[in-house]
Image (cartoon, grey):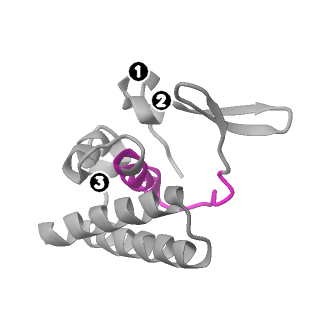
């Protein structure tokens, strides 16, 4: 799978704040006003544009972006610009459903924010078709 480098400085602040550290037992850190360990246990192989798709939900949930603003950041990623629109809509729907399922099994305020963000992005994508 080919990747295209993107300057770290060109990424949105919430994404720049997600720093992957490969030292000791800490795998990922989220740096805001303090450091948080982030579990990226869902890492998997897939289309290059999927990472940018996940960013949409994170930018909406944690960064306070509107779905269109989140997608404007995604447009800066070459793989995103070549994504199939119907594939993104299916991905957005699946992402909303998985967060709904997670929230049903283990509700908490953070999960609720992720559900709301995933639903907002899914609804935004549906409105574009």
From this view, report whether residue 6 is shown above or below residue 101: above
Tell me residue 83's x, y (percent). Answer: 31, 59
Q: Mark 2, mark 3: which one is toward the viewer? A: 2
Real-space Cα separation, disc 3 to disc 1, in angstroms = 22 Å
Mark 2 or mark 3: which comes first in sequence?
2
Real-space Cα separation, disc 2 to disc 1, in angstroms = 8 Å
Q: Read off the residue under disc 1.
A: 9
Q: Read off the residue under disc 2.
A: 16
Tell me residue 21's x, y (percent). Answer: 70, 31
From this view, report whether residue 75 is shown above or below residue 8: below
Residue at the far left in the pictured view: 128
Instruction: Say what secondary structure mark 2 lies in.
Output: helix
- Find out whether the residues at labels 3 and 1 contact each other: C-beta distance under 8 Å: no
Instruction: Say what secondary structure mark 3 lies in.
Output: loop
For the point 23% across and 48% down, the residue is 66
Instruction: Say what secondary structure mark 1 lies in.
Output: helix
Give the extent of the magenta segment.
40-60
Q: Mark 2, mark 1: which one is toward the viewer? A: 2
Tell me residue 53's x, y (percent). Answer: 39, 55
Real-space Cα separation, disc 2 to disc 3, in angstroms = 23 Å
- Find out whether the residues at labels 2 and 1 contact each other: C-beta distance under 8 Å: yes
Mark sitting on residue 82: 3
Residue at the far top in the pictured view: 9
Q: Is residue 42 magenta?
A: yes
For the point 33% across and 50% down, the residue is 80
In the image: residue 25, left or right of residue 116: right
For the point 36% across and 59% down, the residue is 117
Q: Is residue 5 visible?
A: no
Q: Is residue 18 magenta?
A: no
Mark 3 or mark 1: which comes first in sequence?
1
Q: Is residue 94 visible?
A: yes
């Amino acid at each position: 799978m080919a990747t295209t480098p993107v300057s770290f400085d060109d990424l949105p602040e919430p994404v720049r704040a997600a720093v992957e550290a490969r030292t000791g037992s800490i795998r990922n850190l989220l740096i805001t006003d303090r450091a948080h360990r982030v579990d990226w246990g869902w890492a998997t192989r897939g289309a290059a544009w999927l990472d940018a798709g996940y960013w949409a939900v994170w930018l909406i949930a944690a960064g306070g972006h509107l779905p269109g603003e989140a997608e404007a950041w995604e447009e800066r990623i070459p793989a995103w610009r070549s994504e199939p629109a119907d594939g993104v809509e299916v991905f957005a729907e699946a992402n909303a459903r998985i967060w709904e399922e997670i929230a049903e099994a283990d509700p908490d305020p953070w999960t609720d924010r992720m559900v709301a963000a995933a639903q907002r992005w899914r609804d935004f994508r549906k409105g574009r078709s």
